Image (cartoon, rainbow, N blue to C red):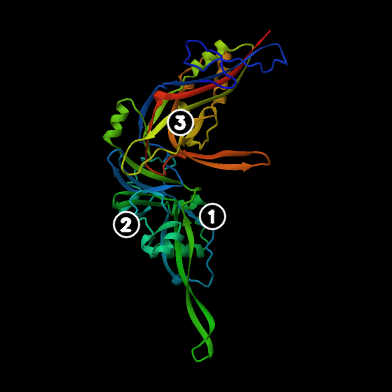
Amino acid sequence: MKYLLAAAVVSAGMFMSCDDDVSGIGGSLSQGEVTITVDSLVTEIPAASIRYESFDGRNTTKLLGRINVPEYGSLTCSFVSQMLSATKMNIPDSISVSDVDSMRLVLSVPRGALTGDSLAPQQLRVYRLSKELPADISTTFNPEGYYNPSEPMGSRSYTLSNIAKGDSALKRDSYVRIPVQMPMSFARELFEKYRADDPVFEWPATFNKYFPGIYVEQNFGNGCVANISKAEMYTYWHRINRTYDMQPDSTYKYVDHIVRDSVSLLASQPEVLSSNVIDYKVSEYIKGLAESGKSVVTTPGGYMVDITFPVQRLLDAYKNHGASMSVVSSLRMEIPAQVIANDYGLSVAPYMLMVRKTDLESFFNENKIPDGKTSFYAAYDTESASYKFNSMRAYFLDVLDRDEQGEVVGPEDMEFALVPVDITTETVETYNSTTVYVTRCQPYLTKPTMTQLDTEHAIVCFTYSSQKID
């Protein structure tokens, strides 16, 4: 291929490169020849599909439900969560415990945030945890022994559709809400503790000792997995409101009205520990693809892909063609990808993280974000059907610097893991520029996905310039 400032020929040990043209840039400043080299090559990236079951399931999104897809496999999701308590109860002092009507756990699902059939009948159960959750919790956490299965706090049958509420609710309400009745004894116990200014509400740690949290499981239904964005416990109460009303005979008198209100006292928030509990049984079809050498990535859990990036060959090409003055302009990699055909609408992962294998575990444990040196991310490009890792220059410069200092470029510098992630960004606009910052990077748990990476036809584009001084 040709470029405006096209490239010099690299050594035969590299790959098929672009045509070579020589630019006279910089000739007025110093005598010599400046060569800008752009190597854009299609190459096979050594890759292997790696099975993994346990990973960090802590996420603001909680999955609930079951789904079976022949090509994908079967997925069962539940979750555990601590609850963050309000520091004080905003209820008038005139309200007593006898005025408390009920308590409900309300699970909120954004409209459309589901996989499967929204009209499929479901039923869930909520249990009170009997001891605190472990700090190193993962998706393979077994809640057995952390709750009493014979004493549920509540249960609820539901569907994930607002269609039964009528057209106005369907258009207006952005959430499907699942209310679950909680025990009255717990509502009154909590009310009395607030009234007594109990110290358990001063800190999340002290409250978690009193109320370790909840476990929510699906005990009936199949064909749908919901993304629960909020879990809140509301206390409902009533009061008497006396007004001076006109009567039918045009006289006035005081009339008592019952007014009902509610307040959220407990909620699952990012400040407290919550984790998805995921049981994913991979289909024989997916296993067959992985065993045949295909690069397969699934979520949540299942398979990720390990690759070996050819940085040593790039180093060799750069040093063989380099001269007294050389500058690396850019390095990027593009990996074609496609969805594995299915009839349930399962698509590809929206983002892919490329992280050095030695840093994979600590990356998520320490809530890191891609730094462009040991970790990178790429959004799925629907037009090119690929993931484009565009900012790898700092990585190459770091390896080059250590190589020039005599350090050996080892496997830890070349081996990376490709993992589906969910990326949260923040855009900062100034007078003449717009910058997008990544603020959060988590394992992708939003939906089941199946992605087949074509690592045999990856594209690596390496651009650098060199100058020979006369």
| SS at mark 3 in the image | helix
Instruction: From the top left corner, tell me how far across and down residue 356 is, in percent.
Output: 47, 27
User: Which residue occupies 62% across, 42% down?
Assistant: 428
Q: Nearer the viewer, residue 356 or 33?
A: 33
Measure how far apart labels 1 and 3 are at the Cα level.
36 Å
Is the C-beta separation of discs 1 and 3 under 8 Å?
no
Number of numbered tags placed on the structure image: 3
Instruction: From the top left corner, tell me how far across and down residue 154 is, in percent.
Output: 35, 59
Q: Which amino acid does label 3 sit on?
A: Leu
Instruction: From the top left corner, tell me how far across and down residue 329 is, in percent.
Output: 59, 23
Measure how far apart labels 3 and 2 are at the Cα level.
40 Å
Instruction: From the top left corner, tell me how far across and down residue 57 is, in percent.
Output: 42, 41
User: Which residue occupies 61% across, 11% down?
Assistant: 323
Q: Which of marks 1 and 3 is nearer the N terminus?
A: 1
Q: Residue extending furthest right?
A: 29
User: Which residue occupies 45% across, 64% down?
Assistant: 235
**Crowd tier of the residue under label 3, counting other residues whose Cα lies within 10 Å: few below 14, some 14–19, many 20 or above:** some
- Above-or-below relation of 257 to 461: below
User: Which residue occupies 41% across, 48% down?
Assistant: 62
| Residue receiving disc 3 | 360
Q: Which amino acid does label 2 sit on?
A: Glu
| SS at mark 1 in the image | loop
